Amino acid sequence: ETLVEIGRDLPVVFPMHPRTRKKIADFGLSTEGLRILEPLGYLEFLGLQKSAAVVVTDSGGIQEETTYLRIPCITVRANTERPITVTEGSNVLVGQDSLRLREELTRVLEGKWKPRRIPELWDGKAGERTADAVLQR
């Protein structure tokens, strides 16, 4: 319901998993005004995120990707297994609170989003550091 409401003011693109599509139908929820896509491959989805003004998710992996891309991320969970995305990155947890989700979206759209940075060592060189560590031993 919140995404449909947001979709009245902002284009909402939703690559939807078939299970999610079924649950939405089972609960009789509307997707009016949302641009529903079939699930995307990794690179296509990453490109979509990179072009987004903001990403709303419940996925830990997406929290990491948006932090690296410096795209505001609003996570509809009460906790995360990737806390660095909240403390240093672009992620905010709103739980299931639709009012809080709307507030955070407003912050993004008004340019008042929290300062963010890519965490130290998220430079794409982990493989090189690992290889160097193995060679040193």
Image: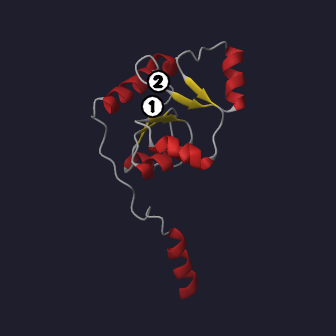
> Residue beneath label 1, please?
94
Q: Which residue is nearer to you in this view: 85 or 69?
A: 69
Q: Which residue is drawn at 49% across and 30% down?
A: 95
Q: Is residue 102 left or right of residue 80?
A: left
Inter-mark Cα distance, 2 to 1:
6 Å
Residue at (46% x, 24% y) in the render: 97
- Residue 137 appears in the rendering: no
x%, y% of residue 19? Answer: 72, 29
> Does residue 135 sit above or below 101 in this rendering?
below
Pointer 2 and pointer 1: residues touching (CB < 8 Å)? Answer: yes
Q: In this view, does 23 lie to the left or right of 46?
A: right
State the residue lying farthest toward the bottom.
136
Residue under the point 51% across and 75% down: 128
Q: Find residue 25 and report its image quarter.
A: top right
For mark 2, what is the residue?
Answer: 97
Secondary element at tag 1: loop
The residue under label 2 is which amino acid type?
Asp
Q: Is residue 106 visible?
A: yes
Residue 34 screen position, x and y as percent: 54, 22
Looking at the rendered image, the quarter that the C terminus falls into is bottom right
Q: Where is residue 126 in the image (x, y as percent from the top left)?
A: 51, 69
Percent of width and height locating residue 109: 33, 29
Q: Which amino acid does label 1 sit on?
A: Val
Q: Residue at x 41, y 20 (%)?
A: 99
| SS at circle 2 | loop
